[in-house]
Amino acid sequence: MPRLTQTRLEDLILGGRMARRLPKADFPTLKIIYTRGNRTETLASIATLRKILNRFVAHRVFYEVSSRNKRGHEFFSAKNTFVVGSIEIVNRDYLTITIFDAHNPSHSIEILNPAAMRIYDDTLGKGFAVSFLSEGAGGVESRCYLRDEGEEGDGIKERCALEKITLPQLFEYLEDITSADVIGTKTL
């Protein structure tokens, strides 16, 4: 009987299909920097990254996307909050992380080929946070900072229909529903 190697075992588990082995260069070289303990590791797997980022799903998140040129004074920054609906991580030609807004399908954040991810988990009482750092051509640095603001129900709640109407409209509504005509007494 032939000896069972790791490759052969993977073939058997996958039902006879060959496992696609990614060369070392195709796997993202994302560095993970932990602020607690000040240690740095290289991303082990996409599943690890997915596990870290899934902490944000169904939570209100504050984000800041910023970019600056090292040589000049150009700088831009965009800040907002939203509830994370889902997170998609794809590694084809380069690592792409897309974070979707739960209440607005046209709003998302896309992080392309980050070089490092810093995890801020050492501040007790403050939300879990991460930042992705990228450096592009021409000395442009980009940063995407995400901070957990709590579960969806804990944050700012959307106003219901009753909260959107004015006080005079409310009195008119109450008058309409309490008038004798609305009660609907029919006489034959």
Image: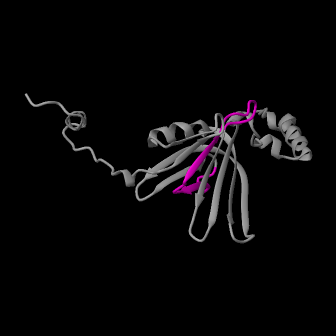
Q: Main secondary structure of the magenta part?
A: loop
Q: Is residue 131 above or below residue 177?
A: below
Which residue shows up at 52% across the image and 36% down it? 51
Give the x, y percent position of residue 187.
78, 33
| Front one among 102 and 172 | 102
Q: Quadrant of residue 70?
A: bottom right
Which residue shows up at 55% across the image and 54% down it? 114
Does 106 sit left or right of 81 as displayed? left
Does 173 sit left or right of 34 as displayed? right
Give the x, y percent position of residue 146.
66, 46
Q: Is residue 119 above or below residue 23?
A: above
Image quadrant in which the C terminus is located: top right
Which residue shows up at 87% across the image and 36% down it? 179
| Front one among 92 and 156 | 92
Q: Which residues are magenta?
A: 104-128
Give the residue furthest to the top.
1
Give the x, y percent position of residue 73.
75, 70
